[in-house]
Amino acid sequence: MSWLGGVVTSKTQGQAQKTIPHGTACRTLTTRAVTYTCVRCGQDETTARYPGPTPRYCSDCKTRRNAKDADADRRAARERMRRLRQRRKLEDEERDARLPAVF
Ligand SMILES: [Zn+2]
């Protein structure tokens, strides 16, 4: 195996970028009555909403969904941390392997 000193591939994947829009933050928002159909139970619900996307779930389903999501979020966060630690460990080992063996 003579991969040492070979091609070094740069790691660009795994980079996260997030853009948070600030454009509407300064506007005065007023609520309006929005009637929508819950995609989960099919019930029509009318609620006062700020301008924005129409909700997809009625308040009942939203509460239930959020409780489930919170649980899933916790699990996902744990998994993310585990993967992050694993990746750091791998990168450390790779770095060590690339270091010239000079003592
Ligand atoms: Zn519903």
Image: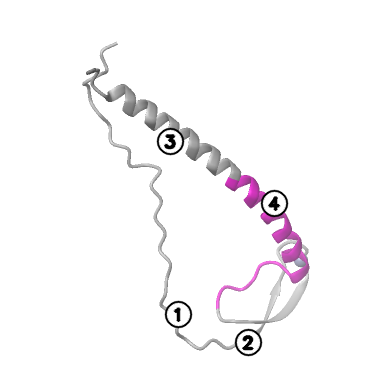
Span of residues in magenta: 52-77
- Give above or below for 74 relative to 2: below
Q: Residues within 10 Å of mark 1 (few under 14, many from 20)?
A: few
Identify residue for label 2. 32
Where is mark 3, residue-wise? Answer: 88
Rate crowding at label 2 as few (under 14), some (14 to 19) or many (20 or more) other CA atoms within 10 Å. few
In x, y percent, where is residue 95? 32, 28
**Which residue corresponds to mark 4?**
71
Instruction: Decide which of tag 2 and tag 4 comes sooner along the chain.
Output: 2
Question: Residue 42: percent from the left, percent from the top?
Answer: 76, 66
User: Of the residues under marks 2 and 1, which one precedes in the sequence?
Assistant: 1
Q: Quadrant of the N terminus?
A: top left
Where disc 1 sits, the SS reads: loop
Q: Quadrant of residue 48?
A: bottom right
Write down the residue under mark 1: 24
* Residue 54 sits inside the magenta stretch: yes
User: Residue at (61%, 73%) from the top-left corner?
Assistant: 54
Q: Are marks 2 and 4 in contact (CB under 8 Å)?
A: no
